[in-house]
Image: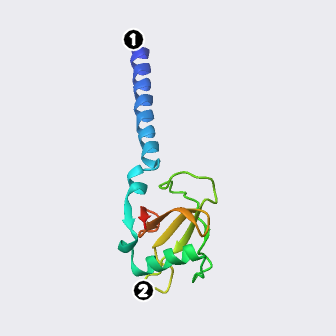
Amino acid sequence: MVQFKNLKLVITGLCVAAAVMSGALFARAPASADWQTTISLGELPKQGVQIYTLIHQGGPFATDRDGVVFGNRERLLPLKKRGYYLEYTVPTPGLSHRGVKRIVCGGQRTLPDVCYYTADHYASFRQIVP
């Protein structure tokens, strides 16, 4: 009888652990609300509009980090093959470094399928609606 209670306790513990772990995994999955939230081109900071325009013109860009592959490690954007997303710095006046604002575009370099804006270094994204 004691062995049955111990077995029951172990099974219950495993079920609880599995539920907690699966909940944590689901929490890391792409959140559709994050990438479906939109921002109009007119709502972007002035520097964001300038970078968005430069993206479609093919540059020139201020830093050598502009146009590099964005890995989507946070998995907040729709999952695509590596190399689909490219990132660009949106300058912040008064900063001597790149800051946290970026535009990430997917698709062709000068004719992207979609672009996203992040003002918090990839913690959240809003799809840019021209």
Q: Residue furthest left?
A: 43
Vertical placement of residue 26 versus 81, above or below: above
Q: Quadrant of residue 71?
A: bottom right
Q: Quadrant of residue 45?
A: bottom left
Could you classify mark 1 by the number of other residues whose Cα lies within 10 Å: few (under 14), some (14-19), or many (20 or more)?
few
Q: Quadrant of residue 43?
A: bottom left
Q: Of residues 103 and 25, which is closer to you in this image?
A: 103
Residue at left offset 43%, top offset 82%: 92
Residue at left offset 38%, top offset 61%: 38
How far from the left and from the top, in percent, is residue 31? 42, 50
Earlier sequence position, callout 1 versus callout 2: 1
- Residue under label 2, please give it: 93
- Residue under label 1, please give it: 1
**Residue 101 left/right relative to 56:** left
Residue at left offset 46%, top offset 73%: 100
Vertical placement of residue 130 versus 63, above or below: above
Q: The N terminus lies in which quarter of the figure?
A: top left
